[in-house]
């Protein structure tokens, strides 16, 4: 049962990451040059995540990984807020804090370390 809960939390963490990337796309759609920002900002967020915050990040470390996660999710929430989606921004913030907090539980961290 713990494994099912753990993998469910990790799946929700992945959904949270996708929502953050989508938030950057929403902000880019609302600003000029729309054709550039709508794909450039999500790609930049994905690149930062890949390099610093993912479990196999080449440059992620003890302090860098959580800092980049806070910056990416924080900016994603601010982007939604600035784009006029205040409720979505608060919902993303709460969802991000809860899901990433659950992912820090020792029983779930074991699943990540096994991979």
Image (cartoon, rainbow, N blue to C red):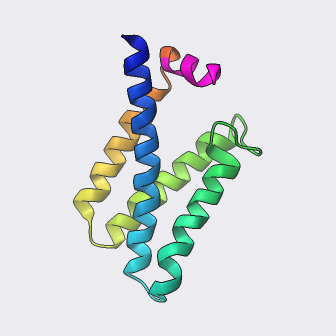
Residue 109 within the segment the image draws in magenta: yes
Residue 113 within the segment the image draws in magenta: yes
Q: Position of residue 36 (x, y in %)?
A: 53, 83
Q: Quadrant of the C terminus?
A: top right
Q: Position of residue 6 (x, y in %)?
A: 43, 21
At 49% from the left and 14% from the top, the residue drawn is: 107
Whether residue 53 is situated above or below residue 80 in the rendered picture: above
Whether residue 39 is situated above or below residue 51 in the rendered picture: below
Name the outermost residue toward the left: 87
Q: Quadrant of the N terminus?
A: top left
Predominant secondary structure, magenta span: helix
Q: Nearer the viewer, residue 14 or 103?
A: 14
At 64% from the left and 36% from the top, the residue drawn is: 55
At 40% from the left and 63% from the top, the residue drawn is: 23
Q: Position of residue 47 (x, y in %)?
A: 64, 59
Q: Which residues are magenta?
A: 108-115
Q: Position of residue 16 (x, y in %)?
A: 41, 46
Which of the 4 image quadrants contains residue 12? Answer: top left
């Amino acid at each position: 049962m713990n494994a099912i809960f753990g993998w469910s939390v990790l799946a929700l963490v992945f959904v949270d990451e996708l929502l953050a990337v989508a938030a950057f796309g929403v902000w880019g759609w609302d600003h000029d040059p729309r054709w550039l920002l709508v794909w450039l900002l999500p790609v930049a967020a994905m690149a930062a995540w890949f390099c610093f915050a993912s479990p196999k990040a080449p440059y992620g470390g003890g302090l860098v990984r959580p800092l980049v996660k806070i910056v990416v999710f924080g900016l994603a929430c601010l982007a939604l807020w600035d784009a006029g989606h205040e409720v979505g921004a608060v919902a993303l913030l709460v969802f991000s804090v809860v899901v990433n907090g659950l992912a820090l539980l020792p029983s779930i961290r074991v699943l990540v370390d096994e991979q």
